[in-house]
Amino acid sequence: MIFRNDKVKRIFSIFCVIIFCNLTVGCNYYRVRSGKVGEDQALRTIDRNDYKTNYYVLHVGDAMWEIDNFDLAHKVIKGELAAFEGAQLSMYERMLEGNGKRVTKNETSFTYQVHVYADSFSKVGETISINEVDVTRIDIFDINQGVRAASIIGTTLLAGVGGLGLLIIVACATACPHVYVYNGETYYFNNSLFTGAIAPQLERDDYKLMPDYFSNSDKYQFYVKNEKEEEQYTDLLELMVVEHEKGTEVYPDQEGNINMVKNPIMPVSIKDDGGKDLSELVGYHDGRAFVFNNSTAKDFSNVYASFDMPEDKANAKLVMQVKNTEWSGYVYHEFTKLFGTYYDNWVAKNQRKKSREEMEADQKRHGLPLVISVKSGDEWVDIEALDLVGSISYNGLAVQLPQELLKGDKLEVRVRSGFLFWKLDYLALDFSANDGFDLHELKPSIANGNRDKNFIDELSYADESYMDHPLYGDSTYVEYHNLPVNSNKQRTIILHSKGYYIPLAKYETKVERKELAKFKADGELSRFSQELFDIQFGEMSLTLE
C-alpha cells in the first residue's frame, strides 16, 4: 500500500514511533515483535471486507462478548452479541501472554481477532451500536503482526482519512505490578499497584477498590505480575473487606480510611479554564471523563466546582472517580529520553539521592499528581495531592475537607492536573458519617510465586521484607480465605498494597542539555506535554471528551 496523502503519511509515521516506545512510569506501549510496521504494512480498517479478522470482541467493564455480523459504517460499530468462548477465547488468553508460542495450522484462524473496549453501547432488539466517542481502546491480534495499535487518550479515532476508515491507535498498559482478578472464567487485568513509586524513597501504601465477582464466596484470588522491564518490590498485600448497608458506597482515602457515601451532592457549577460546562462529563460515573486538555491554561489544566453547603458541615468529603491517561506515560518517556546515555547517571545522582519530600515536590510542581484545593477568601489552599493511580481502571477516592475551610453556604473547589495527565469521571460532595460498617483485614492464605517461591511472610506484614519480582514475567498467585458473607449486607473489597519498583530504561541517544535546562521551571512537564501533543496531533483537531 502506498500513501500519496502527506497527512496520512505523517499520522502513520507518528504511529510507528509511538508503538515502539517502552515507557518507564505511566505505561509501556506494546512492542511489535514481528518487525517494524512501515507504510506498506500500515494499520488498515477493521471492516471485515478489508481486514482478515475472524473474531470481533466487545469489552465493557468486566464483561466480554463476541460481536456477530460486525459492521463499521459512519463511525458506528454494529452487530449482535454472542458468548466469546471455546478455542477463540483460549487463543486470546494465550496471545495475551505473548507472541512467542507456537501455533499449529489448525489454530491459525483463531489468531485473527479485534478487541474493542468501550464505555457503553446501545441496544435495539438484538442489534447493538457503539459510537466512536464511547470507544476507548482497540486491540488487533494477528499471527503475522502481533498486537497492534489501540486506544488514544480518551477517544479512539475511527477517522475516515482518504476514504480508508483508518484507525490511529496506540496500545498501552500501565507499568508497576499488574493485578489479574479471577472473574469465574479467566483472570481479568483489573488494576495496578503503587503507580509512580519508582524509587525506594517513594515506597507507599496504595488502596484500590476491587471487583467483587462472587459476593457469596468466602474466597478471593488473583495474580500479581511483572509485565514490564523493571524490578518490583511488594512489602504488603492485605485485603480489606467492608460490610455495610445496602445502597451505600465505600470510598477509601489515600491513608486507607473508610469513607461512607450515602447522599452525594452534585456541584451547582463545574467548569474548565475556558468556562465550558463539564456537568455532563463529570456528573456521572459513566466513563465519559474530562481529560484536562484545556489549552487556555498557562501551565496546568483545571476544573472549578462550586457546591451549596448545608448548615451541618461535619464529615465533609469530596468523592471522585479518577485514573491516569495513557498519554502521561508517553510524555514521561519522552522526558527521560532527553537524558540519553546519561539517564542511569541522572537516576543515581538525582532521583535516588533526593528525599521523598523533594521528589514529591518535583512531581507536584510539574503537574503529575492531581491537586485538590479549596478557596479561602481570595486564595486557593491545597488540601491534597493524589498519587498516580494508573490508567487501567477508574479508581474511587475520597478527600477529607478541613473544617476550618468550610465557611459560609458555598464551597469552591479546584482540581488541577498537568496537560492530559489525568481523567476525571466523577466529582461529588458528601457529608455522611463514617460509621455503620464492619472492617475485616485479611492476610494472604496462599502466595505462591514462580520459581517455587512462597511469599506468605513477605506479604503479610509491612516489615521491609519484600516479595521481589525482579524479572519480566515474574508472577505470584495470591488467595484469601474466610471473607465474610452476609446476604443482609453489601460487601466492598479494597486491596491494600505497599511497595515500589525500579524502571530499567536504557537509551542510546545523546543528551539534550538545552531541552533539559527548561525543566527547571515550574510546570515545564505540563507545557512539554502540550507541546508534544500539538506537534503530533494539533492539526487533526481531536475531540478528547
Image (cartoon, rainbow, N blue to C red):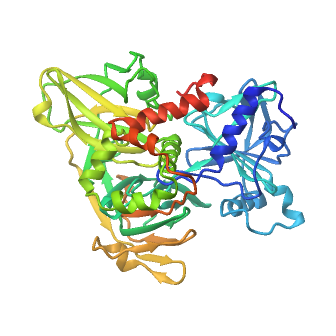
Quarter of the rendering occupied by the N terminus: top right
Query: Furthest residue to the left?
Result: 404
Question: Residue 173 placed where, x, y %?
Answer: 56, 51
Q: Total number of numbered labels?
A: 0
Q: Which of 378 and 451 is in front in this view?
A: 378
Question: Residue 429 placed where, x, y %?
Answer: 28, 32
Residue at image coords 20%, 36%: 316
Residue 167, by quadrant, is: top right
Question: Residue 66 placed where, x, y %?
Answer: 73, 46
Residue at image coords 47%, 51%: 339
Residue 150, by quadrant, is: top right
Image height check: is 488 above or below 273? below
Q: Is residue 127 visible?
A: no
Q: In this view, does 154 lie to the left or right of 479?
A: right
Residue 404, by quadrant, is: top left
Q: Can residue 147 be seen in this view?
A: yes
Residue at image coords 42%, 58%: 193
Query: Furthest residue to the bottom?
Result: 452
Q: Nearer the viewer, residue 467 or 11?
A: 11
Query: Furthest residue to the top?
Result: 275
Residue at image coords 22%, 36%: 382
Q: Nearer the viewer, residue 215 or 6?
A: 6
Image height check: is 496 above or below 40? below
Question: Residue 375 placed where, x, y %?
Answer: 20, 26
